[in-house]
Amino acid sequence: MVEASDTERDAAERIFGVRLGLAERFVQHLATSGIERGLIGPREVPRLWGRHVLNCAVVAELIADGARVADVGSGAGLPGVTLALARPDLHITLIEPLERRVAWLEEVVMDLDLENVEIMRARAEQAMGRVSCDVVTARAVSALDTLAGLTIPLLAGEGELLAIKGRGAQAELDKAAKVIRRLGGVETTVVVAGADILVEPTTVVRVIVSKR
């Protein structure tokens, strides 16, 4: 069992509520088969709760009720699986091109019985026209100027991109500004999620896309 600190457990209880047990099982998947199959590095085990699961799950507070979410480059289910656990009202499509990662995601989703999740084996550009979504999420996929071209088209002209980033978020956003505007981005901001829950809130680049 990967133990959360007292602070992390308090945060997890607030985020996952009655589904905390499922979140704990997800962390165990990451710490065992996730490492065995190369989805998570062994050095990350002590940081699974704080740096990975909670860091991703708080993004749920930025998403509207009942939204359809496409998670690009899901990999180890971050943030897609954590969002599905925190928000059973959301419909999550995990988009991942690598077969071994897809196989692992399928096993995890089945074990956790996440009825609000579907998995699509595809590159982001291959998913265009195959997925209908209001929100696109991504974490550790690529720099924002490249990521914008992979994610914004999935929104079909209307919705928002939530990209989890680090301290260089504003610099990435400034560099990607022209690309984002060309793709239909009408409003861009750097926001934080989990400010009242986490010691280190999550930095998110938010891009609103509209045809208007």
Image (cartoon, rainbow, N blue to C red):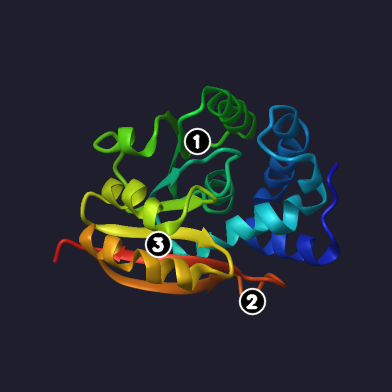
Say above or below: 208 vs 118. Answer: below
Residue tagged by mark 1?
Answer: 115
Disc ID at residue 64: 3
Percent x, y of residue 122: 40, 30
Cα gap from disc 2 to disc 3, whole angstroms: 19 Å
Question: Disc 3 or 1, which lies upstream in sequence?
Answer: 3
- Residue 4, position as x, y percentages in the image: 82, 55
Q: Amino acid at mark 1?
A: Glu
Label 1 near label 2: C-beta < 8 Å? no
Residue 67 at least partly seen:
no
**SS at circle 1:** loop
Q: What is the distance, in whole Å, between disc 2 and disc 1 at their CAs? A: 29 Å
Residue positioned 39% across, 34% down in the render: 123
Q: Where's residue 92, x and y in %?
A: 44, 43
Q: Is residue 170 left or right of residue 199?
A: left
Spot occupied by residue 152 in the image (x, y as percentages of width and height): 31, 53
Q: Secondary structure at mark 3?
A: loop
Q: Is disc 2 placed on a helix, strand or loop?
A: loop
Residue annotated with mark 2 = 196
Kindly identify the amino acid type of the residue bearing the numbered disc 3. Answer: Ala
Q: Residue at x 47, y 73 (%)?
A: 170
Left/right of residue 73 with respect to residue 196 in the rendered view: left
Residue 70, image quadrant: top left
Instruction: Report which quarter residue 128 is drawn in.
Output: top left
Q: Amino acid at mark 2?
A: Asp
174 and 57: which one is in front? 174
**Residue in front for this viewpoint, 29 or 138:** 138
